[in-house]
Image (cartoon, rainbow, N blue to C red):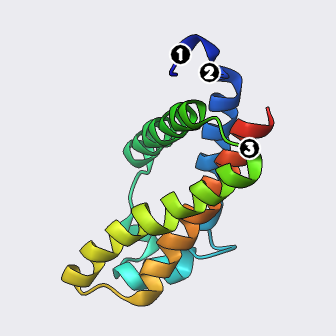
Amino acid sequence: MLSFSELNYLAIVLATIAKFMVGGLWFSKMLFGNAWLAEVGLKEEDLGSPLNALLIAVGTCLLVVFSMAILFQIMALDLRTTLAVTVIMALGVTSAQMGLSFAFEDRSLKLFLIYATQCVTEFVIVALILNLM
């Protein structure tokens, strides 16, 4: 049963920060930033000020993490099952839905894989934080 008072809000905040940081790292030059820019046809100077994007990113990270926290509380699963459900959500729901858009927009498999692996990585990290705290 859902009880907002039983949610671990510290874990939600930390998982939100972690998700945001993984996304930043994912699209940095250290990982997939250059490949992502090439796949979307942009140059670094085309991006402009990131303030709006960063604010939206923090808000959407919080929404995803809060939603996952609620789902995990309702399901009350052990860690192993939670991780399995998390990977299914990331691959079978989020990434598969994104893949539909990619197919009709004629986007590359490489770009899809950048986003899909980001999704799986972030979801697993969020699940670990929410379940281990």
The answer to whether mark 2 and mark 1 are in CB contact below 8 A is: yes
Give the alpha-carbon distance from disc 2 to disc 1, as whole Å: 5 Å
Category of crowding for the residue at label 1, using alpha-carbon neighbours closer than 10 angstroms: few (below 14), some (14–19), many (at least 20): few
Using the rendered image of the protein, determine whether residue 27 is visible from the camera's viewpoint: no
Q: For numbered disc 1, what is the local secondary structure?
A: helix
- Please determine whether, in this image, residue 52 is positioned above or below residue 104: above
Classify 10 Å Cα crowding around label 3: few (below 14), some (14-19), many (20 and above).
Answer: few
Q: Amino acid at mark 2?
A: Leu
The disc label shown at residue 7, or none: 2
Tell me if label 2 and label 3 are in contact, CB under 8 Å.
Answer: no
Q: Amino acid at mark 1?
A: Phe
Kindly state the secondary structure of the residue where label 3 is placed.
loop
Inter-mark Cα distance, 1 to 3 = 20 Å
Q: Position of residue 123 (x, y in %)?
A: 59, 54
Amino acid type for the residue under numbered disc 3:
Asp
Quarter of the image for residue 32 reads: bottom right
The label on residue 4 is: 1
Residue lying at 80% horizontally and 38% vertically, measured from the top left: 132
Quadrant into which the C terminus falls: top right
Q: Which of 73/18 is in front?
A: 73
Identify the residue under disc 3: 78
Q: Is residue 31 above or below residue 75?
A: below
Instruction: Please give left or right for residue 60 compared with residue 127 in the image.
Output: left
As drawn, the residue found furthest toward the right would be: 132
Q: Mark 2 to mark 3: distance in Å?
A: 16 Å
Image coords of residue 38 (percent x, y): 43, 85
- Expressed as whole percent of the image width and height from the top left, the position of residue 55 reads 43, 38
